[in-house]
Amino acid sequence: MIASVVKAEPVTYVREACVWVRNHPDKFKRLMHLCHREVDRGNPSIQRGDIYNLARRAGFDISECDEVDMAGMWREIVNPTTTFLARNWQEAKRAHEEGCVCAA
C-alpha cells in the first residue's frame, strides 16, 4: 500500500497513502468493505488496530502515521469535499470513548 521509504517523515506516509487511495479506488473500497463487514458482525467500535489486523489478514501492507493533518492531505489528494467528524485521530478516539460512533 505504501511505498518503501526508510525513516520517512509521517507526512510522507500520509501523502503516499492518500495518493494510493486516489490511484487504487477499488482496493480502498475493499478495505472499507472489511471495516463495514466487521461493524455488521456486531463490532460497532472497530478501531485502528482492528483495521490494521483485518487489512493485514486480507493482504494489505499498512503502516501507521501520527501527528499529521491527515484530513487536510486527504482533501488535497483524494477528495476536497470529504467531511470528517473529528479534526484528528485523538479527537476521534475521544469521541469513540465517549460512545459517539456515528457516521453522519
Image (spheres, helix red, strand yellow):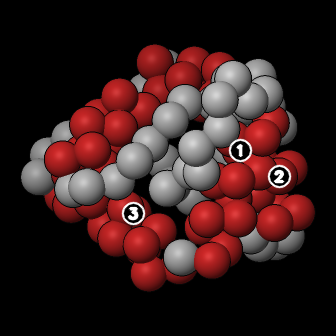
> Where is the C terminus found, in terms of image quarters?
bottom right
SS at mark 2?
helix
The label nearer to you, 1 versus 3, is 1
Q: Residue furthest left?
A: 41
- Identify whether 25 is placed above or below 96: below
Q: Amino acid at mark 1?
A: Val
Query: Could you give the CA–CA distance between mark 2 and mark 1, rounded to whole angstroms?
Result: 7 Å
Query: Could you give the CA–CA distance between mark 1 and mark 3, rounded to whole angstroms?
Result: 17 Å
Q: Are marks 2 and 3 in contact (CB under 8 Å)?
A: no
Q: Are marks 2 and 1 in contact (CB under 8 Å)?
A: yes
State the residue in front, 13 or 30.
13
For the point 81% across and 66% down, the residue is 77
For the point 39% across and 63% down, the residue is 32
Label ID, residue 14: 1
- Residue 4 image position (x, y, % from top left): 58, 44
Closer to the chain start, of discs 2 and 3, is: 3
- Residue 63 image position (x, y, % from top left): 50, 35
Closer to the chain start, of discs 2 and 1, is: 1
Q: Where does label 3 land, which residue?
A: 32
Q: Amino acid at mark 3?
A: Met
Q: Residue furthest bottom?
A: 26
- Answer left or right for 72 relative to 38: right
- Residue 73 image position (x, y, % from top left): 83, 52
For the point 57% across and 19% down, the residue is 94
State the residue in front, 24 or 99.
24
For the point 76% across and 57% down, the residue is 74
Label ID, residue 68: none
Q: Where does label 2 land, which residue?
A: 73
